[in-house]
Image (cartoon, rainbow, N blue to C red):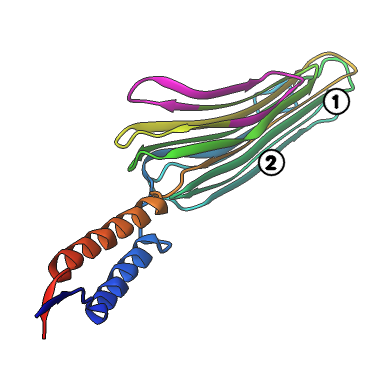
Amino acid sequence: MRRVRRWRWREFGSRLLLVSAVATFATAPGSHATPALLLEQDRGVFSRASAAEAAAFDEEIASDEAVDTTPFVGDVQSTGLTAGAAADAAANLDSDLDGSLIEAVGAASTGADTPLAGTRAEAPADSFFEVIFEATASESFTLQGSIEAAAVDAHAFASVEFVDLDTATVLATYEAPVGIQFAIDDAGMLVAGHEYRLTAFALAYSLEDLWGSAQSADASYEVMLVLPEPSQNAALACAVAALAGLYRLRRRANRFELAP
């Protein structure tokens, strides 16, 4: 009788295939829970234009506060026109709340013109976006985009802010007063169980009551928050660890066997 090392490759191979299948499933798209649980959201656009001494005005509003991830697209325009004054306002927003991607593009613009004395033109407009979510995993995030504001004898403003509500920590904040354009580029870590708020805002306002004057204002934002799904590397590491454990168990059981 002698000791020989005998490997049971058939059984070992079948278990290897099983572990590989588990790893494949774990890393397949859609096999993870969403990294963000939507709690609240408020998305909308507003425009108003008046061009008269009376209180009459043209106003449009479009908004969505439902707690769901349905994409929201809003586009409003308002016009006020009299013999001696003209006002116009417009705002738009295109947003998406995918589980791993929160994206919003919005803008507001206004104009006011009073070619005749004794007339008045007013035009405010804004585009607003706010979403509050809970992080379901401790993962990294990236925040990118831009904001811009420009005006001629008027008012314009744009801003983006990302806040950890549990710790009241401002993770990123950008503000663009008139004449300023900012590129947004931030990154960091989310904490599982914490609530976060992302807001973006663009405001344009024109008011003219002087003879022979004109005003215009434009503000815009573009923001994209990327929340990666739980790391596929973690799933692969689990599969490799399981395979290594299986290898050790089979080696311990089959290292020495009696053979004729």
Q: Can I make out residue 64 in this image?
A: yes
Image label count? 2
- Tags 2 and 1 touching, CB below 8 Å: no
Instruction: Give coordinates of residue 92: x percent, y percent.
Output: 64, 41
Look at label 1 and name its amino acid. Gly
Image side of residue 28 versus residue 78, left or right: left
User: For the point 31% across and 60% down, which residue is it?
Assistant: 239
Q: Can I make out residue 48 in this image?
A: no
Which of pointers 2 and 1 lies earlier in the amino acid sequence? 2
Whether 55 is drawn above or below 95: the answer is: above
Quarter of the figure with the N terminus: bottom left
Whether 230 is drawn above or below 44: the answer is: below
Instruction: Give coordinates of residue 84: x percent, y percent.
Output: 85, 25
Q: Verify whether residue 4 appears in magenta.
A: no
Look at label 2 and name its amino acid. Gln
Q: For the view shown, which residue lies furthest in the bottom direction? A: 260
Q: Which element carries disc 1, helix, strand or loop?
A: loop
Q: Which element carries disc 2, helix, strand or loop?
A: strand
Residue position marked by numbered label 2 in the rendering: 77
Whether 40 is drawn above or below 112: the answer is: below
Looking at this view, is 79 or 27 the one in front?
27
Instruction: Give coordinates of residue 52: x percent, y percent.
Output: 74, 25
Looking at this view, is 82 or 164 the one in front?
164
Measured Cα–Cα span from mark 2 to mark 1? 21 Å
Q: Bounds of the magenta span?
A: 162-185
User: For the point 34% across and 64% down, which residue is it?
Assistant: 23
User: For the point 67% across and 36% down, which residue is it?
Assistant: 107
Residue position marked by numbered label 1 in the rendering: 84
Quarter of the figure with the C terminus: bottom left
Q: Residue 111 carries which label?
A: none
Whether 151 is drawn above or below 106: the answer is: above
Q: Specify few, some or many for label 2: CA neighbours under 10 Å numbering under 14, 14-19, or 20 or more.
A: many
